[in-house]
Image (cartoon, rainbow, N blue to C red):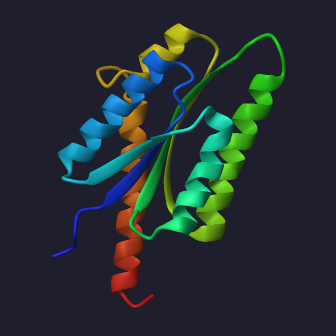
């Protein structure tokens, strides 16, 4: 029998009430399948890819990673840079290093959009990110078991 997946949740609690909802949905999705997890916090969404890269290289105890955070559009182009670079950084890690990453960084226009997407009773983007991560963990395990 395969052990339950062990996942690292990497959370950017810049908007603490929004990230708390994302984490609640993520933890609920993990519990639903019997997966275990650990949580770490980083200052913002831009730091999430670096934290996942460091954790992935420093330890083999994680089967996958889930990025949780929120970027709300402001008055400058800072939003565009943070959204693009955090997504690119995570995709680069996933493709280059072959690691399972669930993308739960909300990129929204305002707080009400963020709350609707973050709530486990709403769009449940934290739970969705976990389910995506677990799908890739499962794929990796199946392919490793098939000798390919």
Depth order, front residue of 52/32: 52
User: Which residue shows up at 31% across the image and 25% down it?
Assistant: 120
Q: Pinpoint residue 101: horizontal percent, then vertical percent.
A: 50, 54
Image height of 127 relative to 88, above or below:
above
Q: Pinpoint residue 28: horizontal percent, then vertical percent.
A: 25, 37
Q: Name the quadrant of the N terminus.
A: bottom left
Q: Is residue 78 left or right of residue 138?
A: right
User: Which residue shows up at 68% across the image and 38% down it?
Assistant: 46
Q: Name the quadrant of the C terminus.
A: bottom left
Depth order, front residue of 25/62: 62
Image height of 91 relative to 110, above or below:
below
Image height of 54 relative to 70, above or below:
below
Q: Pinpoint residue 21: horizontal percent, then vertical percent.
A: 38, 23
User: Which residue shows up at 25% across the image and 54% down it?
Assistant: 35
Q: Image quadrant of residue 9?
A: top left
Q: Pinpoint residue 25: horizontal percent, then vertical percent.
A: 32, 32
Depth order, front residue of 6/106: 6
**View extreme (right): residue:** 77
Q: Is residue 7 left or right of residue 105?
A: left
Depth order, front residue of 33/13: 13
User: Which residue shows up at 39% across the image and 82% down it?
Assistant: 144
Q: Is residue 85 left or right of residue 45?
A: right
Image height of 141 relative to 81, above or below:
below
**View extreme (bottom): residue:** 147
């Amino acid at each position: 029998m395969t052990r339950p997946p062990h996942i690292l949740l990497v959370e950017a609690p810049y908007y603490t009430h929004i990230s708390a909802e994302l984490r609640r949905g993520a933890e609920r999705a993990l519990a639903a399948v019997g997966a275990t997890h650990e949580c770490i916090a980083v200052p913002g969404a831009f730091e999430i890819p670096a934290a996942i890269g460091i954790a992935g290289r420093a330890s083999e105890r994680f089967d996958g990673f889930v990025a949780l955070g929120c970027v709300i559009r402001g008055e400058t182009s800072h939003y565009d840079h943070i959204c693009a670079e955090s997504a690119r950084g995570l995709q680069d890690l996933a493709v280059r290093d072959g690691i399972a990453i669930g993308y739960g960084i909300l990129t929204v226009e305002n707080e009400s959009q963020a709350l609707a997407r973050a709530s486990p009773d709403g769009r449940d983007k934290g739970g969705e990110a976990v389910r995506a991560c677990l799908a890739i963990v499962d794929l990796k395990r199946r392919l490793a078991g098939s000798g390919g």
